[in-house]
Amino acid sequence: MLGVYAARAMAIRFVEIKSSESAEALNSEWVILENAGKTPFSTRGCGMTVGRRGSNKKSLLGIIDPGFVLQPGERMRMCTGNPATEAHGKGPEDDTKNYFLFLPRTYVHGPGTVLTLVLRGLPVSKAEFDPTKPSGIVASPAK
């Protein structure tokens, strides 16, 4: 059972990381997750950690509750702030759905910020922020 779960988990990936335009405009900071697998994936109970490249120290930003289900091929933008707080901004309005994390402050702090989506303490997906890349993500090394 764990092997099947692990295979499903690996299909979730970060496709974009964007840092905030200001400390107040929290909804201008986001990550976009994509389900590249063949089965739906529920984020309920998942958490997200933030750390720095080269450091084992990580902080849990919180647990995604109630979460959302990503269907195969679907993307979701997770904006940092609260859409009801005017200073945070409304979040982007395009074809990608927004999910708001209601966090009190930004968490993407420059190059080398490492984000990990976790479920029950196990990594589901991981990405490193690079503001020089169009997606904001360090390219994976070729295999």
Image (cartoon, rainbow, N blue to C red):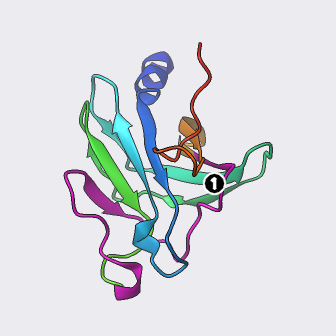
Image x and y of residue 128, in percent: 61, 43
Q: Residue at x 42, y 40 (%)?
A: 15
Residue 60 is covered by the magenta coloring: no
Q: Is residue 34 left or right of residue 128?
A: left
| Residue placed most toward the observer, 66 or 95 | 95
Q: Residue at x 60, y 47 (%)?
A: 130
Residue that carries the numbered disc 1 in the rendered image? 50
Q: Residue at x 45, y 29 (%)?
A: 9
Amino acid type assigned to the residue bearing label 1 in the image: Val
| Residue placed most toward the observer, 105 or 43 | 105
Image x and y of residue 65, in percent: 38, 59
Of the 4 image quadrants, the one containing the N terminus is top left
Quick check: 24 above or below 116? Answer: below
Residue 112 is covered by the magenta coloring: yes
What type of secondary structure mainly makes up the magenta span?
loop
Instruction: Specify the farthest residue to the top.
Output: 143
Q: Which of the 4 quarters of the picture holds residue 36? A: top left
Q: Residue at x 50, y 68 (%)?
A: 20
Q: Is residue 73 left or right of residue 129?
A: left
Q: Is residue 85 left or right of residue 141?
A: left
Is residue 132 something that shows in the picture? Answer: yes
Image x and y of residue 30, in percent: 44, 59
Label 1: how many residues lie within 10 Å, few (<14), some (14-19) or many (20+)? many
Quick check: 65 above or below 115? Answer: below
| Residue placed most toward the observer, 125 or 95 | 95
Is residue 119 something that shows in the picture? Answer: no
Of the 4 image quadrants, the one containing the C terminus is top right
Q: What is the total number of numbered labels drawn onto the structure image?
A: 1
Q: Is residue 107 left or right of residue 72?
A: right
Please provide the residue range marked out in magenta: 86-115
Secondary structure at numbered mark 1: strand
Image x and y of residue 61, in percent: 57, 61
